Amino acid sequence: MATNDVNPLQPYFLVYVYDDRVIAYSFAQPKQVLEVFRAVCTGQTSAYEELCRLFDRQTVTGAELERYNRLLDAAVKSIEKTYRKRAAAKLGEGRGGLLPTKEEQVTEKTDFDLITWLIIAGE
């Protein structure tokens, strides 16, 4: 089974994480994540400067990212859990169901590259 049977956006994973580390949308719901991005970003041609300054103050210009690292950890755990569930579900779809190879599987040891993120500031 190809990994993209489990994740159609392979090799990319979209995850929406709330500030309390609750997963709003896992990678299994890319349409919803993209709809949020579109709603927030439509018509924006540049970053909100005041929010960028606030982020820099909160993170000491990126030197203190513990809060965001915890959110990233929550996203990775969600990816691993959802991946396992979806891969196992594929086994029940008929005789052709196979698990991804060990190299294709997503685990806690999988290296991810963070390509981009969007911080949505709320009240």
Image: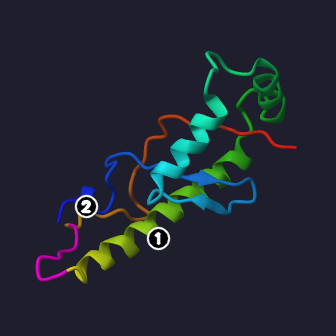
- Can residue 104 be seen at all in this image of the molecule? no
For discs 2 and 1, the disc positioned in front in the rendered view: 2
Q: Residues within 10 Å of mark 2 (few under 14, many from 20)?
A: few
Q: Is residue 17 left or right of residue 67?
A: left
Quadrant containing the N terminus is bottom left
Task: Give the residues drawn in magenta, as a range.
Answer: 94-100
Quadrant containing the C terminus is top right
Q: CA distance from mark 2 to mark 1?
A: 16 Å
Which residue is drawn at the image coordinates 65% and 53% (left, top)?
71
Residue 91 position, x and y percent, is 23, 80
Amino acid type, label 1: Lys
> Mark 2 highlights which residue?
5
Residue 57 position, x and y percent, is 84, 29
Q: Residue 63's quadrant in the figure? A: top right
Name the magenta segment's main secondary structure.
loop
Dot 1: what SS? helix
Residue 92 vs residue 76, the one in the foreground? 92
The label on residue 81 is 1
Mark 2 or mark 1: which comes first in sequence?
2
Count of number-bearing discs: 2
